[in-house]
Structures are given as structure tokens and as C-alpha cells.
Amino acid sequence: MDKLELKLPPVAVAFVIGLLMWLVAKIHMGEQFLPQSIRLELTALFLLLGAVVGLSGVCAFKRHKTTVDPTRPENASTLVTTGIYQISRNPMYLGLFLWLTAWSCYLSHLIAMLLLIPFVLYMNRFQIRPEERVMEGLFGPQFEIYRRNVRRWL
């Protein structure tokens, strides 16, 4: 299983989960669990939140001139701990999670929404933990202090 670590770009993982959500919603036609009156508002809210959180993370990395390539964390030149990174250690992944949440609201299908769980589990195991090992090796005690003070997701 270690062979999956840092291999699939998180955007690709989110796309696959989103596709599975859509398939589940199409195959298992059931009643929508969200009332039509708030479904689109929740979708828009989570889309906007995802964009703000995710793009804030990307912009912070660009400002600090460090890599945004999630498959090569060893290329990181700076440990970014300011801005959105004071709230979440992984705002780009949180942004993807919020976009998937928006998609599940739009689909308004309970089983599709449950597919958010495998996304988080996959990201924690095959993306975030390996990244954290690399960051610990690169930044040592500075990263350990950061990890103790800022939560992984929120």
C-alpha cells in the first residue's frame, strides 16, 4: 500500500471521488435529502468557501516561493505557517473537500455525501502523512511545533 503514497495528485483523487458521487446518485435514484430551497445555496456556499480556502493556500505557497506540487514535497523550500496556514495545515486539500461537499449538496444524495469519508481517509493516509514525514525531515523542530499548534484539516 505504501506504493500509493504521494503518487496520485489530490485533484485527481477529488475528481475520481466526485465521479463516484455522480455515479452513485445516478444509479441509486432516491429522494434528495436536501430541500430544493436550500440545496443551491449550500452548493454555492461550499463552492465559494472551497475556492477561498484552497486558493489562499496556493497563493501563500506562491508568495513564499515554495512548491505546490503535492507529489514532490521534498522540493519544499519554506515551511509556510502564516495566513490560512495558521488555521489549517492543509488548506488546499480542505478546499478540495469543500468543493466535494458542494458537489454532494448539489447532487443531494446521502450515499454520495458519504463518499467524502473515503476522500479524507485516502488523503490522510496516502498524501498528508507522507508529506508530514518529509516536512519533519526538512524542517525538524520547526515543523513539530507547527504540527502541535495547527490542526491537520480545521
Image (spheres, grey):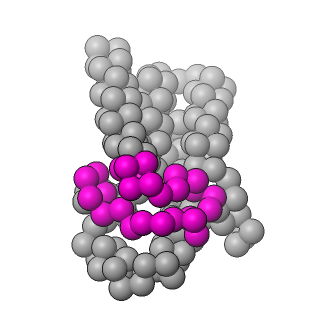
Residue 145 x, y percent position in the rendering: 29, 79
Q: Does residue 68 belong to the magenta stretch? A: yes
Does the rendering let one see residue 92? Answer: yes
Left or right? Give the position of 22 relative to 136.
right
Residue interval drawn in magenta: 60-85
Where, by quadrant of the figure, is residue 90 drawn? bottom left
Count of marks, rendered view: 0
Observer-nearest of 139 and 109: 139
Observer-nearest of 136 and 122: 136
Observer-nearest of 65 and 59: 65
- Depicted 50 relative to depicted 117: above or below: above
Residue at 39% in and 67% down = 79
Residue at 46% in and 32% down = 104
Image quadrant occupied by the C terminus: bottom left
Does the rendering let one see residue 33? Answer: no
Residue 3 x, y percent position in the rendering: 74, 68
Residue at 33% in and 29% down = 48
**Magenta stretch secondary structure, dominant:** loop
Observer-nearest of 20 and 4: 4
Where, by quadrant of the figure, is residue 51 drawn? top left
Image quadrant occupied by the N terminus: bottom right
For this orientation, the residue located farthest to the top is 37
Residue at 42% in and 84% down = 140
Left or right? Give the position of 68 relative to 148.
right
Residue 57 x, y percent position in the rendering: 38, 48
Left or right? Give the position of 50 relative to 2.
left
